[in-house]
Image (spheres, helix red, strand yellow):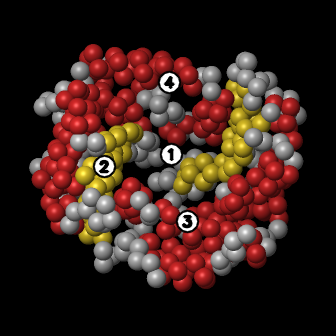
Amino acid sequence: MARRRSPSQILQRIRAWTVPNPRTIAREVLPNGIIVLAYENFSSPSVVLSGLLWAGAMDEPPDRAGLAAFTAEMLTRGTAHRTFHEIYETIESIGASLDIGAGYHTTGFSLKALAEDLPTLLEILADVLRNPTFPEEEAEKVRGEILTDLQEREHDTRRMAGLRFRETLFQGHPYGRSVDGYRETVQAITREDLAAFHRKFYSPERMIIAIVGAIRAEEGIEAIRRVFGDWVAQRPAPDPLPSASRPDRWIHVHTPIPGKTQTDLVMGTVGLARKDPDYYAAALANCILGVFGMMGRLGDHVRDRDGLAYYVYSRLDAGLSPGPWSVIAGVAPEHLPRAVEGIRTEIRRLLERRVPAKELEENKSFLIGSLPLRLETKEGIAGVLVDMELFELGLDYLERYPEIIAGLTAAEVQAVARKYLDPDRMVLSTAGPEPDLP
């Protein structure tokens, strides 16, 4: 069995390995507000680009839920200069990839190509972001695909448990709406809705683009300037985001799905934002609870020791605003009451007793040691660079991160768990056969 390294040993190894830093990351803000981050990596002849612009589900009216996602899906379906088939034939002919999708606050995009094909892909990316035409025939095809997916969601215990969890936890809050929308709201979206959403919200203001790969940093920045530098558009200021309160009691909601042999559950509360000073202690607490090894304490207790779950883990969604801190599990229906109580028991243990030194060090080593793994690929580096800019972490973030984690204490872990987690004041969402819960 391999011997585990301590956080100090891992720190020494990471210090000897050069991570992207202020000396190797080029950052430039174009006159129209686009922020470009470039990092050279000649390990292979490919280039990866990752980025976002500020148009998301937060900008859509409730009766058009899914509009941002529908708009993003339509971008490659035809532009003022290219048809849908011309776009995809070009991409496929050079073995490249282009993906676009919307979230709550932003629409993200990514592409990968050989360095020699980057100009072609950048021209297509700029064209689809700036000049989509939303052809009626293609809109109906995409609508059909979305509606089919939403219909399938209604029979998926895992997706429905997650959907009802968000709706209940964030009731009356934009985070409570499905980014994908609902059948009735997607049916109501018109071609003009798509075009109007694009005209109103797609803008280069504060757009973030990270380019990583076999291209000189200055050449990468210039390539982006060439296709996006003359884009001028302004979006309206976003509405203030309402605060989301943590539950003041235990709330259970169930979605019956007949014919299923498994019950899926999501259980949790409102957590914290990524820029919150408590974030790193919360990330360590979450790792201990349901990530490290075979899904942390939850995996050890609920799945392995008691055999009550097919899978169980915890998740901390910390974004621009506080997201959910939750536990996700799949169980046999007859095991649901004991599985829920086992989860609550592990949360209480995190609140009542400080994490033993050995367990704390193992989890810190895991979080520190996972950093190089995240940066093994160009896609991983590009994604981290976008997050560094999005959350204002600084270009030296990757150098500071190991020291931040290594410095956390058991007292801080316990304090943050007590601040945010109360097993008697949570939302439990289950989906599947009718549950037998008190």
- Please report whichever mark, 2 or 1, sits nearer to the chain's N-terminal start: 2
Labelled disc at residue 370: 3
CB within 8 Å, label 1 to label 4: no
The residue pinned by badge 4 equals: 149
Give the left or right position of residue 301, taking residue 15 as reference. Answer: right
Question: In the image as oriented, which residue stretches furthest toward the front?
Answer: 1
Spatial CA distance of label 1 from label 4 is: 30 Å
144, above or below 268, in the image: above
Give the left or right position of residue 365, taking residue 36 as reference. Answer: right
The residue nearer to you, when weighing 366 against 337, is: 366
Identify which amino acid the numbered label 2 is placed on: Lys
Q: Check disc 1: other Cα within 10 Å, few if <14, some if 14-19, many if 20+.
A: few
- Please report whichever mark, 3 or 2, sits nearer to the chain's N-terminal start: 2
Q: Nearer the viewer's eye, disc 1 or disc 3?
A: 3
Spatial CA distance of label 4 from label 2 is: 27 Å
Tag 3 secondary structure = helix
Q: Nearer the viewer's eye, disc 4 or disc 2?
A: 2
Residue 295, image x, y percentages: 70, 54
Residue 235, image x, y percentages: 26, 43
The residue pinned by badge 2 equals: 112
Residue 230, image x, y percentages: 11, 49
Tag 2 secondary structure = strand
Q: Nearer the viewer's eye, disc 3 or disc 4?
A: 3
